[in-house]
């Protein structure tokens, strides 16, 4: 009876060991695939193309001649739009790599997907309009007497001037 329990224990250890090594190999395969990913995207009018690496850093920036028609603010907005789109594309590629290696339902898969989703959120359908605070109201000054016997004015309208003595 002790021999049978020992055989079962050895079989369980072998099974567990192979599961752990299989998960480690899948995680290593995922890391290799993610490290080699790049994503590219263009701006709204196609004048700007940005390529990012798996870390989200810019690996390339291509501009067409039509950017000469844009002012500085429009050009920077186009570059940032293309940059965010490329990063969102990177998140989609990582999701595919997770599904093919460790699986999105595993703890490792969920952690990797959550990390990329937080760092590189999906591009909203509509660009977010900047919200400028409203200017403060223009101050109004009312000339009110501070004491009951004072008439409104600049101080010398009472008719009694200390310099007249």
Image (cartoon, grey):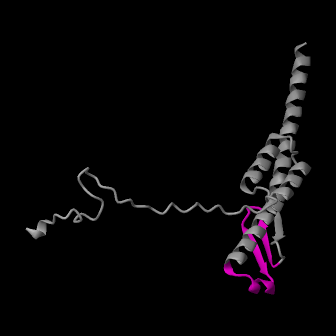
In the rendered view, tell whether residue 116 sits above or below residue 70: above
In the rendered view, tell whether residue 77 sits above or below residue 142: below
Tell me what residue is drawn at x 74 percent, y 73 percent.
Answer: 79
For this rendering, which residue is in front, 126 or 1?
126
Measured as percent of width and height from the top left, residue 152 is found at 30, 60
Measured as percent of width and height from the top left, residue 40 is found at 83, 69
Q: Quadrant of the C terminus?
A: bottom left
Range shown magenta: 47-72
Q: Quadrant of the N terminus?
A: top right
Residue 131 lies in quadrant: bottom right
Magenta residue check for 71? yes
For this rendering, which residue is in front, 106 or 6?
106
For this rendering, which residue is in front, 65 or 135?
135
Residue 123 lies in quadrant: bottom right
In the rendered view, tell whether residue 41 sits above or below residue 147: below
Tell me what residue is drawn at x 22 percent, y 65 percent.
Answer: 156
Magenta residue check for 56? yes
């Amino acid at each position: 009876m002790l021999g049978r329990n020992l055989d079962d224990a050895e079989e369980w250890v072998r099974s567990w060991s192979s599961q752990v090594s299989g998960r480690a190999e899948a995680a290593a395969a995922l890391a290799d695939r993610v490290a080699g990913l790049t994503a590219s995207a263009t701006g709204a009018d196609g004048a700007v193309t940005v390529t990012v690496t798996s870390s989200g850093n810019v690996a390339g920036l291509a501009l067409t001649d039509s950017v000469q028609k844009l002012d500085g603010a429009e050009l920077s907005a186009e570059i940032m739009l293309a940059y965010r789109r490329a990063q969102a594309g990177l998140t989609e590629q990582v999701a595919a790599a997770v599904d093919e290696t460790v699986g999105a339902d595993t703890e490792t898969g969920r952690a990797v997907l959550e990390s990329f989703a937080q760092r590189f959120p999906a591009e909203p359908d509509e660009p977010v309009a900047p919200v400028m605070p409203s200017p403060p109201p223009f101050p109004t000054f009312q000339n009110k007497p501070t004491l009951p016997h004072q008439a409104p004015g600049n101080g010398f309208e009472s008719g009694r001037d200390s310099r007249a003595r």
